[in-house]
Image (spheres, rainbow, N blue to C red):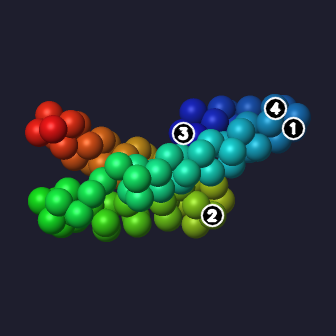
């Protein structure tokens, strides 16, 4: 999504910008869906006990991928915020994989 936003902002071609916008919105939806799968199917109650901020991270990340975030914004800073949340979730994910 970040690359799509950067390419959109760097182009003057209306057709290209339209495609970049559509792809960005599709990818935002995919990110939300992948986050939801991790949140609901992978992480278990023990994970949420060990990492009490996990629910908040997922909530903030899914909102950042939604209409109020990357799906509805052309701000690179919003994409960076989403990437930072995803990185935090990924760190916890890999910690849980090591412990398993």
Residue 56 placement (x, y as % from top left) = 31, 67
If the image is split into quadrants, where does the N terminus sit? top right
- State if disc 1 and disc 4 touch (CB < 8 Å): yes
Answer left or right for 49 relative to 90.
Answer: left
Say few, some or many: other residues with alpha carbon within 10 Å of mark 4 (under 14 / 14 to 19 / 20 or more): few
Label 1, label 3: how far apart the Cα atoms are:
19 Å
If the image is split into quadrants, where does the C terminus sit? top left
Answer left or right for 40 relative to 74.
Answer: left
Q: Along the line of sight, which residue is nearer the eye, 75 or 70?
A: 70
Q: Along the line of sight, which residue is nearer the eye, 3 or 61?
A: 61
| Residue that mark 3 sits on | 2
Label located before the other in sequence (1 or 3):
3
Label 1, label 2: how far apart the Cα atoms are:
22 Å
Say few, some or many: other residues with alpha carbon within 10 Å of mark 3 (under 14 / 14 to 19 / 20 or more): some
Secondary element at image label 1: helix
Secondary element at image label 2: loop
Compared with 83, 44 (above or below) is below
Residue 28 placement (x, y as % from top left) = 60, 49
Label located before the other in sequence (4 or 2):
4
| Residue that mark 1 sits on | 14
Compared with 77, 49 (above or below) is below
Answer left or right for 2 relative to 85.
Answer: right
Label located before the other in sequence (1 or 2):
1
């Amino acid at each position: 999504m970040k690359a799509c936003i950067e390419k959109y902002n760097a182009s003057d071609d209306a057709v290209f910008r339209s495609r970049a916008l559509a792809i960005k919105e599709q990818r935002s939806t995919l990110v939300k869906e992948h986050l939801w799968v991790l949140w609901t199917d992978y992480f278990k109650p023990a994970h949420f006990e060990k990492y009490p901020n996990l629910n908040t991270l997922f909530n903030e990340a899914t909102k950042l991928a939604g209409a109020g975030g990357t799906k509805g914004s052309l701000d690179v800073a919003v994409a960076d915020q989403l990437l930072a949340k995803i990185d935090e979730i990924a760190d916890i994910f890999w910690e849980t994989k090591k412990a398993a």
